[in-house]
Image (cartoon, rainbow, N blue to C red):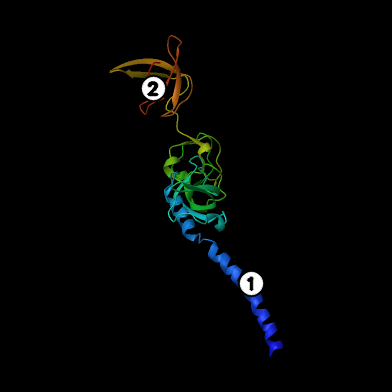
Amino acid sequence: MHNFLSPFLLLSLIVKSMVFPAASMATGAPDTEPLRSQIEQWLNTQQSIRSDSPLNRQVTLITPAAQLAGLCAQPQLSINARDRRLTGNKTVTATCGQQRRFIQIKVQTSGNWFVSRRQLAAGTIIDMEDIQPQSGSADFLPPGVLFSAAEIVGQTATRVIQPGQPLQQNQLRKPWRISHGQQVDTLVQSQGFSVRSRAKALTNAAVGDMLRLRTHSGKIISGKVTASGQVELVDGE
C-alpha cells in the first residue's frame, strides 16, 4: 500500500504545484475588460473628425494587465489633442487623483467615407453626383480622408482625382472668392467708425482666407475675405 500511495501522492503534489501558482497569477492580475470598454466608449465620444455617420473605434489594450493593478475603477481619461489619427497605437492617460498611468492601446476604426464616382480634373467644382459613399475598415486609409459630404461638395479639386479614390483634404480647396489682380473693396472698423477704400489683390483667396493687397499708394495691407467679397482689414493697417 505504501508503495502504491507514494507515486500517487507525488503526482498530486506535482499537479498542485502547477495549478496553484497559475491560479495565484490569475487572481493577482486585474480584469482589464471594464477598463478597455471604458476607454473604447470614451474614445467613441471624442469625434474630432466631422462625419455624416458615427465612426466606430475598437480598442485593444497593449499595456500588460499586471501594470494596471491598483488603478481606480473610473479614471479620468485623456489623450494628446494633437494625435488626430483614426487608427494605430496611441497612449491614453488615466488619472485617479494624484495617481497617473500611461496606457498603451491599439485602435481600429470602421466607418463611411467618400470616393470619387468618376475621374475629376483639376479645377473641377465637385457636386454630389461626383462622389459616392464607401464603408469598411478605415485602418489603411490615407491621412486626411473626408467623412462628410459637406466638406467635399462645392470644393475645387486641386489635382486629378481617379475613380474610386478616397477624397482627401489636400486634394481640395475652397473656390476662390477673390482672384489675383482683382480690385476689391476693403473695410476697416475701429472705435465706432469705419473706413472703406479699394485695393488690388496680390493673390487668390477664398472666403475666410487672409489676403494681402496693394493700395493705390503702393502700401501693402492684409485682411480677411468675407462672403460678400469684401476684405476686412486688420485693425491698424
In the figure, 160 relative to 97: above or below?
above
Residue 200 in percent (x, y) is at 44, 17
Residue identifier under label 1: 18
Q: Nearer the viewer, residue 90 or 221?
A: 90
Q: Quadrant of the C terminus?
A: top left
Q: Nearer the viewer, residue 32 or 231?
A: 32
Residue shown at the point (45%, 18%) measured from the top left: 213
Label 2 to label 1: alpha-carbon separation: 79 Å
Residue shown at the point (57%, 69%) measured from the top left: 23
Mark 2 element type: strand
Q: Is residue 227 left or right of residue 77?
A: left
Residue shown at the point (45%, 26%) measured from the top left: 205
Q: Quadrant of the N terminus?
A: bottom right
**Residue 129 appears in which quarter of the rendering?**
top left
Query: Looking at the picture, which amino acid does disc 1 mark?
Result: Met
Residue 197 in percent (x, y) is at 36, 15
Mark 1 element type: helix
Residue extending furthest bottom?
A: 1
In the figure, 21 relative to 147: above or below?
below
**Which label belongs to residue 231?**
2
Residues packed near mark 2 inside 10 Å, few (<14), some (14 to 19) or many (20 plus): many
